[in-house]
Image (cartoon, grey):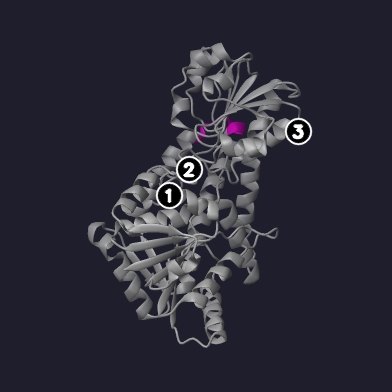
């Protein structure tokens, strides 16, 4: 099949590579000329493990190409995916102007019947609005093209998006006609034949809600365990043992029960806000999700609270931040908890030093007065405290004795429960951990 993809961000590029790996001819379009130039030259505009190799393999096979001419992605395509951003407005509602613009492009340039698949995360009923946009544009140009609008939400985790695409745990497709499902089943047939996962066939509105419900639930799970962590800290209990025991219950599961700095990234903050707004629009107060957001803000503030407790005054103190991306395995800093920590430290007059194996250049554009280092140990040298904000594996390898040797003052705020606190304490370090009993130095 021939497939067009509008938008070459994280979702769009992974969609291009994944569909090409199924044997389809895929054209990726973006109106960002610089990004398209990078992709045409074989350069990645962002870091995602395995994606560069996937795209290069499919490029070598002649199955993908990138263009700044939207007609190349639309004319002749069986399916066009809308993979554009849906950023939050000030009131929490998603900005759907990019989705509408993409739908208008399809209506303007399509010359034959086509399936339009919304891959962007959108509120329920967006499919209907896309359908209306397509039909209005078609009438305006007196065209006779017919459209099928389907919802095909993505469930990608940054840092493992390629694996999630090639070996998904489900494929959700919402279509309001048998014809829409027929095309999408044919599109995914090679994947379904080689990988055992369910094809969840439903209507468009239900598919749109599945995406928001999934992300909101995972975000709530994270906030729940962080709330439990606050209780454990006050009671002298261990949140990790609590989470492990909870996880043995098949009804609960262990995933997303890691107490720490809370959630960040491009999806959870935006999608929780959007789901609250959707509920409001439908006349339902989704109070549970409002509390999820509140607990997450509280989690972001935890490291600086610990630094104030252990160092008293932060003005003039040097604090090393290890990890800037919102999670390991990506250079994405959107809503990264580390940014809030840096912002608060600078507001209190602290000197901030930082390291991240992938995200430092992006953060440097936001905080140019922070000193960035190529190696984690360089950031620790002569600091009064270290805060772990992202659990990169390379930080696990730093020996406690080395940490004690490098720091000018023996304070460790482990906001990801990365290190063995007993070993740190044995080296004379004072340790603050999320929801866990802290051993004495």
Q: Percent from the top left, x then y, of residue 30?
A: 51, 59
Is 387 part of what is drawn in magenta? Answer: no
Judge from the rendering whether residue 251 lies leftward or rightward of residue 370; answer left or right.
left
Q: Earlier in the sequence, mark 3 or mark 2?
A: 2
Which is more toward the observer, 218 or 134? 134
| Label ID, residue 347 | 3
Mark 1 or 3, closer to the camera: 3
**Vertical side of 409 occupied by 345: above or below:** below
Q: Percent from the top left, x then y, of residue 215?
A: 50, 55
Instruction: Count residues near mark 2 (Cα–Cα under 10 Å), then give few for <14, some for 14-19, many for 20+.
Output: many
The answer to whether residue 270 shows anywhere in this view is: yes
Q: Earlier in the sequence, mark 1 or mark 3?
A: 1
**Vertical side of 357 occupied by 97: above or below:** below
The image quadrant where one finds the N terminus is: bottom left
Q: Percent from the top left, x then y, of residue 64?
A: 36, 57
Marks 2/1: CA distance? 9 Å
- Name the residue carrying label 2: 257
Residue at point 58%, 60% (across, down): 86
Marks 3/2: CA distance? 31 Å
Mark 3 or 2, closer to the camera: 3
Q: Residue furthest left?
A: 193
**Vertical side of 306 occupied by 212: above or below:** below
> Where are the magenta residues, as a range?
233-239
Which is more toward the observer, 352 or 409? 352
Marks 1/3: CA distance? 40 Å
């Amino acid at each position: 099949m021939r497939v067009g993809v509008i938008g070459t961000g994280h979702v769009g590029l992974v969609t291009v590579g994944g569909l090409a790996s199924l044997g389809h001819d895929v054209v990726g379009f973006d109106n960002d000329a610089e990004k398209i130039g990078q992709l045409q030259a074989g350069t990645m505009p962002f870091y995602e493990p395995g994606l560069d190799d996937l795209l290069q393999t499919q490029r070598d096979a002649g199955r993908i190409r990138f263009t700044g001419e939207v007609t190349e992605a639309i004319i002749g395509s069986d399916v066009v995916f809308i993979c554009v951003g849906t950023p939050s407005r000030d009131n929490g509602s998603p900005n759907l102007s990019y989705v509408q613009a993409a739908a208008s492009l399809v209506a303007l340039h399509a010359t034959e019947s086509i399936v339009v698949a919304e891959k962007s995360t959108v509120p329920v009923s967006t499919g209907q609005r896309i359908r209306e946009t397509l039909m209005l544009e078609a009438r305006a140009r007196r065209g006779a093209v017919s459209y099928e609008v389907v919802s095909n939400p993505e469930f990608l985790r940054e840092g493992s998006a390629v694996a999630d695409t090639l070996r998904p745990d489900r494929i959700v497709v919402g279509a309001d006609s048998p014809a829409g499902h027929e095309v999408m089943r044919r599109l995914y047939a090679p994947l379904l034949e080689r990988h055992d996962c369910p094809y969840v066939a439903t209507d468009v509105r239900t598919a749109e809600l599945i995406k928001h419900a999934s992300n909101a639930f995972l975000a709530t799970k994270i906030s729940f365990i962080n709330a439990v962590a606050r209780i454990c800290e006050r009671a002298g209990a261990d949140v990790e043992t609590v989470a492990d025991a909870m996880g043995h219950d098949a009804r609960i599961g262990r995933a997303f029960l890691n107490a720490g700095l809370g959630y960040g990234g491009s999806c959870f903050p935006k999608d929780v806000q959007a789901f609250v707004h959707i509920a409001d629009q439908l006349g339902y107060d989704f109070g549970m999700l409002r509390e999820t957001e509140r607990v997450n803000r509280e989690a972001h503030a935890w490291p600086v609270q610990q630094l104030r407790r252990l160092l008293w005054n932060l003005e003039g103190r040097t604090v090393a931040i290890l990890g800037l991306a919102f999670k390991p395995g990506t250079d994405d800093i959107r809503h990264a908890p580390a940014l809030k920590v840096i912002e608060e430290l600078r507001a209190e007059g602290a000197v901030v030093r930082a390291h991240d194996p992938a995200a430092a250049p992006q953060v440097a554009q936001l905080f140019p007065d922070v000193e960035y280092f190529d190696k984690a140990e360089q950031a620790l040298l002569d600091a009064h405290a270290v805060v772990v904000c992202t659990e990169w594996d390379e930080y696990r390898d730093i020996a406690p004795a080395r940490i004690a040797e490098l720091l000018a003052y023996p304070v460790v705020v482990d906001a990801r429960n990365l290190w063995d606190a007993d070993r740190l304490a044995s080296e004379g370090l004072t340790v603050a951990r999320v929801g866990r009993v802290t051993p004495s130095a």
